[in-house]
Amino acid sequence: MLANSKAFSGFSVNHVSEARKFYETTLGLPVSEDNGMLTLHIAGGRDILVYPKDDHTPASFTILNFPVDNVESAVDELTRRGVRFERYPGMDTDMDEKGIFRRGGPLIAWFTDPAGNVLSVIEDSSSVWDDHQLDRAWPVLRVEAWVAPSGEGGAGVECGSSLGLP
């Protein structure tokens, strides 16, 4: 039903004017404004809607990833433009002094917009990432569960689960 729909993404901010300055001036994206909302014109032809929300709460996950040829160069340039890169508890040993995550997979560095939404620059080697590479690039909480026969002859069932970061 929606296979041919030209879907787009959107997210909220608390101040459209601050968001416009950040996305247009700091990040260098083409931006337009209409009816009090912003449109980010990103490469690939899929615009992103940025809308005001009085009770905005930043997402607790990355809302927008920017593939770049060289993460180190992108981090250096964004730092010169005033961007501060995030450091997350428990990941300090996997990040260098610039805030680049180096545990495996593509290099990635996270930062926030003025509304607190999490963005990233991620190194794009121009290859197609398989699931294993994506698992290593974005650490997420993994939940595993299993059911197995227990005891001699499988008379019962043993269940278990585990939580953890990959």
Image (cartoon, rainbow, N blue to C red):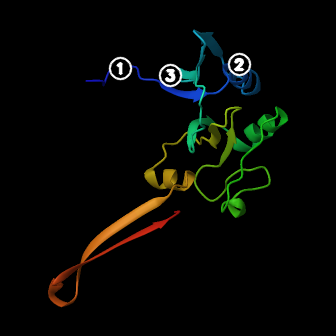
Q: Is residue 1 toward the left or the right of residue 105 in the image?
A: left
Does label 2 or label 1 sit earlier along the sequence?
1
* Res 40 label: none
Name the residue beneath numbered marker 1.
Answer: 5
Q: What's the CA distance linking mark 3 and mark 2? A: 22 Å
Secondary structure under tag 2 reads helix
Residue 156 % position (x, y): 19, 81
Mark 3 sits on what residue?
46
Q: Amino acid at mark 3?
A: Arg
**Residue found at the far front of this picture:** 55
Residue 145: image location, x then y, percent: 34, 67
Q: Is residue 35 above or below residue 56?
A: above
**Furthest-bottom residue in this view:** 152
Residue at 62 percent of width and 11 percent of height: 33
Residue ID at (67%, 56%): 102
Q: Badge 2 is on which residue?
A: 17
Residue at 60% of width from left, 38% of height from top? 58
Q: Is residue 115 above or below residue 97?
A: above
Q: At label 1, which amino acid type do we have?
A: Ser
Residue 35, percent across and down? 57, 9
